[in-house]
Image (tube, rainbow, N blue to C red):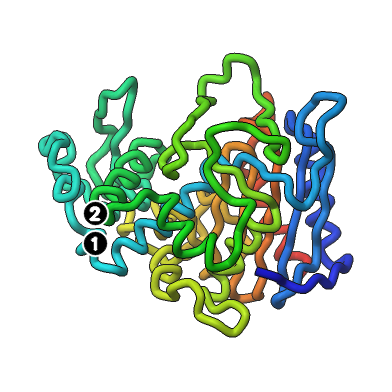
Amino acid sequence: MFINKNLNDKFNPVISHVHNTYSTVDGSGAAIVIIENDQVVTENYWGSGSKSPNARTIQEDTQFHVASVRKSYIGFAVAYAVHHGYIASIDDLVTKYLPELDSNLLNGSTLRNLLTHTHGLKENDGDISREFAPGQSWAYRGINIHLLTQIVKNTTGKTVSQILSEQVFQPLNFTESGWYAESNDKLAEVIREPGEPNWHPFKSTDGDQMNMYVSARELAYWGYIHLKEGFINEQQIVDKEVLKLATTLQSPKLIDVDLPQNGFLWFVKELPAKKSEIGELVPKGSYQILGYTGVAVLVIPKHNVVAVRMFNSFGSPGGFDYLPDIRSFGDTVMRCL
């Protein structure tokens, strides 16, 4: 996929915002790409792929570990399974598709709950327990991703990565997005504290683990595909209904209106929820996803904008609050408009 460049200084405050965050977190490289009105208008790269003195500089084809941003790709795979009838409804019980699970523990838990972080489940050393009744609150845990990737494979007979490759990566000639079992010189090293408890190396390339790397430009293109509802270069290349399913509000009505709202794992802007990662100034209908490495993609359909930032810092240094930072990222984009 090719998008023309028309670089200008309109989003310079966003460049400064990303650079300031880069200077604050413990990373070695960063990038920003912004698409507005079907053109790349901002593109900047800083630093290198590791702290090694001989490290490769960050450049167009550098791929960053996207952490939880991978969930937007998993959301696409689930939406694909729903649209094509492999999953009858996201209001089906989880145990319909994973009957081996404890039906008493999962009583009432639906796929909608898994997709919107309202499932109330948590996992510790393989043991699943319940924090709250399904649909009664919101909590960001990893167990739902594990269950959803299993459901995709069980129902479609394909892995998440196979679906993405067939439906998106191959048709649009993406070569800088995927799950990697081994490192290579284009993959930015994940900078982290020794013994970081949330870091785990993975070898699976099925799309079910946290080892996805994407370049800044292809993450921007990923957002752009959603913005254009799959209609790229005068062709409907990606199924419109799959993309719409993934990015429209799917959360059940919650008692606390300040809790985040989600589509198929994307964070979506519906109400001005104070605990959402999406900035206050960002308009309704926008959607975003953020990873533990600071990587984020924000899509603002009202203004035909996609904004992507990339870092290779795993987690946050002491005293750094990620939520005001990511909310102000979106608000800074809006101030430039």
Quadrant that contains the N terminus: bottom right
Query: Which residue was labeled with disc 2?
Result: 155
Q: Are marks 1 and 2 in contact (CB under 8 Å)?
A: yes
Up the image or down, 35 lies above or below 278; here it is: below
Element carrying mark 1: loop
The residue under the point 28% across, 56% down is: 156
Image coords of residue 173 (percent x, y)? 60, 63
Element under disc 2: helix
**Counting residues from the N terminus, which is met first, the one under dot 1 or under dot 2?**
1
Residue position for label 1: 86
Instruction: Tell me if residue 137 comes above or below residue 305 in the rendering.
Output: above
Coordinates of residue 268 in the picture (x, y in percent)? 48, 60
Quarter of the rendering occupied by the C terminus = bottom right
Q: Amino acid at mark 2?
A: Thr
Residue 7 position in % (x across, y down): 85, 68
Find residue 269 and report its horizontal and vertical position in percent: 51, 63
Can the viewer see residue 113 in this picture? no
330 or 232, which lies in front? 232
Q: Is residue 285 above or below residue 71?
A: below
Q: Residue furthest left?
A: 104
Which is nearer the eye, 180 or 69? 180
Q: Residue furthest bottom?
A: 234
CA separation, marks 1 and 2? 5 Å
Amino acid type of disc 1? Tyr
- Label 1 environment density (alpha carbons within 10 Å; few <14, some 14–19, many ≥20): some
Circle number at residue 103: none
Q: Quadrant of residue 28?
A: top right
Residue found 51% across the figure and 47% down from its top: 70
Residue drawn 64% across the image and 51% down it: 176
> In this rendering, does residue 84 appear at all?
yes
Q: Is residue 73 left or right of residue 39?
A: left
